[in-house]
Amino acid sequence: MARLLIGFLVFLTGAFTAGAAWCQAASNPNLNAQLLVAARQADLVAVKRVLAQGAAPDSRNRLGKTALMLAAEKGNLPLATTLLQAGADVNLASVEKVTPLMAACFGGYSEIVRQLLDRGAQVDAVDRMRKPPMVYAAGQGHAAVVTQLLDRGVPVNAVYENQLTALMWAAGQGHADVVRLLLARGADPTPRDDRGLRAADMATQAGHAAVAALLQGA
């Protein structure tokens, strides 16, 4: 299942290699830098202080990550809420085109996902590997987040890069709860990807016999 595994490498690399250097576009580079440092350290008091002093909520580091992105990656709800209230852009992506919603979906942080969606986060945005938020959620097995995305209008049988569906991503990673959820919401187990594999085939190849049986009985 190399394809399903490698799809997350871009996100993981970006999530854990953010350095101390940043690029600034707003009027106060020093405050903006302090905001990014405080966000990276999950220092809510410092974040509130520098925002009050005039730091730009959408300041970005060298990887293009905003403070909101850093909060979403860590699942830090108080920090994310503070930044959203300060006007942070919910759709501002990193240089790898990863959005805060994708980061929150990857981590399964459902309340952050809800707040981002309520503020207009785009459910159909894709990263550099052409993965949308649904792929992040289904591939990581976060049933609650998958439900949120479906409830916000993401088609259950949407076809993504390489003719993969959310059901295929969940099956290939062995996430039985998500597979059951998607099937209950009308997911079709019969489509094939660009290699001719169905969701059940992917589960079988990855050694997830119980998931494969679940799909074969659907």
Image (tube, grey):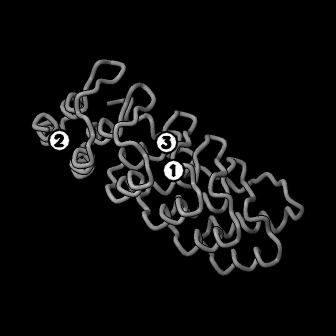
- Across and down, in percent, residue 12 comes to 50, 46
Q: Nearer the viewer, residue 62 or 116?
A: 116
Q: Residue at x 67, y 51 (%)?
A: 92
Q: Is residue 142 above or below residue 192?
A: below
Q: How many residues crowd mark 1 within 10 Å: few (<14), some (14–19), many (20+)?
A: many
Per the image, the residue denoted by label 3 is 132
> Looking at the figure, which quarter contains the N terminus?
top left
Q: Is residue 8 left or right of residue 24?
A: left
* Tag shown at residue 211: 2
Q: Residue at x 58, y 46 (%)?
A: 98
Q: Nearer the viewer, residue 157 or 129?
A: 157
> Dots 1 and 2: beta carbons under 8 Å?
no
Compute the Cα span from label 3 to label 2: 23 Å
* Tag shown at residue 168: none
- Across and down, in percent, residue 152 comes to 44, 54
Question: In terms of secondary structure, where does tag 1 sit?
Answer: helix
Task: Give the residue type that dot 3 points to.
Answer: Pro
Quarter-wise, where is residue 26 in the image? bottom right
- Across and down, in percent, residue 53 comes to 82, 77
> Looking at the figure, which quarter contains the C terminus?
top left
Task: Give the residue type that dot 2 points to.
Answer: Val
Per the image, the residue denoted by label 1 is 102
Compute the Cα span from label 1 to label 2: 25 Å
